[in-house]
Image: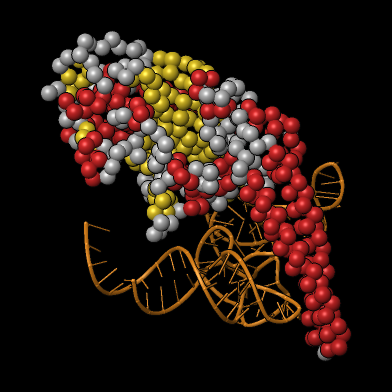
Amino acid sequence: MLQVPFIRQNKDLVLERLTLKNFKELGLVDQVIELDDKRKKLTLEYDETKAKANSLSKEIGKLMAQGKKEEAESRKSEVTSLNEKLHPINEELAAAEKLLHDTLVKLPNLPSALVPPGKTPEDNVEVRKGGDIPALHEGAVPHWDLAKKYDLIDFELGNKISGAGFPVYKNRGARLQRAMIQYFLNYNTSKGYTEFQVPHLVNEASGYGTGQLPDKEGQMYFVTEDELYLIPTAEVPLTNLFRDEILKDSDLPVKLTGYTPCFRREAGSYGKDVRGLNRLHQFDKVEVVQVVHPDKSYEVLDEMVAHVEELVKALELPYRILRLCGGDMGFGSALTYDFEVYSTAQQRWLEVSSVSNFEAFQANRAKIRFKDGGGKPQLVHTLNGSSLALPRILACILENNQTADGINIPKVLQPYFGADKIVL
RNA sequence: GGUGAGAUGCCUGAGUGGCCGAAAGGAACGGUUUGCUAAACCGUCGUACGGGUUAAACUGUACCGAGGGUUCGAAUCCCUCUCUCACCGCCA
């Protein structure tokens, strides 16, 4: 959520930045300012009237103590008439505040100066590239065929017990996933991230705090009976750990990592996007989150990108890093880098990580603040990134490392997996 | 699922109608003392939104789980809701 004083002081910049993000309803900006004007005017009116009533009420108390009943009675009627004025003002104020808030949450975060213009994924800018795309042997096949051949994943079983998009991993497929989770978490903690295990269902306030609600309501599974949302990413519980907290500046930066399953309804997805492991309703992911001083967030973003890059490199996968254009970025992000790895058998890039700086956008919603010295609390900056999302990594490992007689396991995973190769 | 208790500031915890934004203790922070540490002593120690100011000072309003009500006046009385805890039942 953007901050109203900032909008008021930088209206032109806000409009320009929102345009870069391909945001259409620019009229909302003026609405915010008008509603804020109204709010201030009504606040002043209410406060002044209430101040009068309060001081009269105090006098009544004193008069009563002195036994001056008649004087007290006349004051009472004065206060009553003030209070009658107060009611409608208060109602109008509450309505204005609610409308202001509802308008404010419709505004996405402003993209940073580094964000390239553009509307579609084609406009994203490649910032780095690494690894080699392997030449596959003659009979190379996509991961869904390999999964079957080596008995690693059973999509039909998933269909049976849950539905499409819920694969069942088994045997060495399950073990390889577990190996990756172990390796990713160990790698993250070795770099100073503290490991957390968090709930996979969260309440409405949490969904709201990180920005999934209200706008992406339809993307989350919702348990109606208990009014809880299944998390679409560990970002939600991890970041909300600090909701409504005022941290000390010495607490910063906070660095967290956690493994969770992620649940996404993915309504409207179809075709080759959902084949095999490409897009699932449930998948595993290891996430990193940082809560940092606002002066440090871009430095930290680079650090996190480098961190994820090391991980992808270690897996020996061909990758590229994209800086997302304005139109392709998420609602709350100020700058996002996507990591894609190349799926050689499908001949396409698959997104495996997204690293974003939210600046104060989530912090403002979730009221995550810090205090330095004796100063006033101010909003932190929050960042998060996948390190990494597992299914597409698994898909690429299977496809890219396949040979005529088996699938090679990346060196770094071998100690966790317990073998260097998957063979028939 | 049943029964009972409770929700106050960073924490513990007092406060049953005006003198309460809220006692006391602890923690934390600053200082004095000290060879260092500890102790002791002094001080500071909520948030939001307004007004005001170059900035402060200063000042108003709101907030004692949330919402509503009674009253001239509510942390305190009433109603509704939410959550937490304890015990019982069931269960990993």
Q: Residue B82: horizontal and vertical position, in percent?
A: 47, 64
Q: Residue A71: horizontal and vertical position, in percent?
A: 87, 85
- Residue A227 visible in this rendered orientation of the protein: yes
Q: Quadrant of residue B22?
A: bottom right
Instruction: Locate residue B23 relative to residue A276 in the image: left or right.
Output: right
- Residue A186 visible in this rendered orientation of the protein: no
Q: Residue A414: horizontal and vertical position, in percent?
A: 23, 25
Q: Considering the image in quadrants, where does the C terminus of chain A appear?
A: top left
Q: Considering the image in quadrants, where does the N terminus of chain A appear?
A: top right
Q: Residue at x 50, y 19 (%)?
A: A122
Q: Residue A4: horizontal and vertical position, in percent?
A: 70, 43
Q: Quadrant of residue B36?
A: top right
Closest to the observer, A223 or A414: A223
Figure colour scheme: secondary structure
Q: Quadrant of residue A42?
A: bottom right
Total marks in image:
0
Q: Residue at x 21, y 35 (%)?
A: A154
The relative height of residue A75 versus residue A349 in the rendered view (above or below) is below
Closest to the observer, B23 or A40: A40
Closest to the observer, A182 or A396: A396
Q: Residue at x 69, y 33 (%)?
A: A14
Closest to the observer, B31 or A210: A210
Instruction: Locate residue A229 relative to residue B91 in the image: left or right.
Output: right
Q: Residue furthest left?
A: A424
Q: Residue at x 75, y 53 (%)?
A: A39
The relative height of residue B43 versus residue A242 in the rendered view (above or below) is below
Instruction: Locate residue A222 relative to residue A152 in the image: left or right.
Output: right
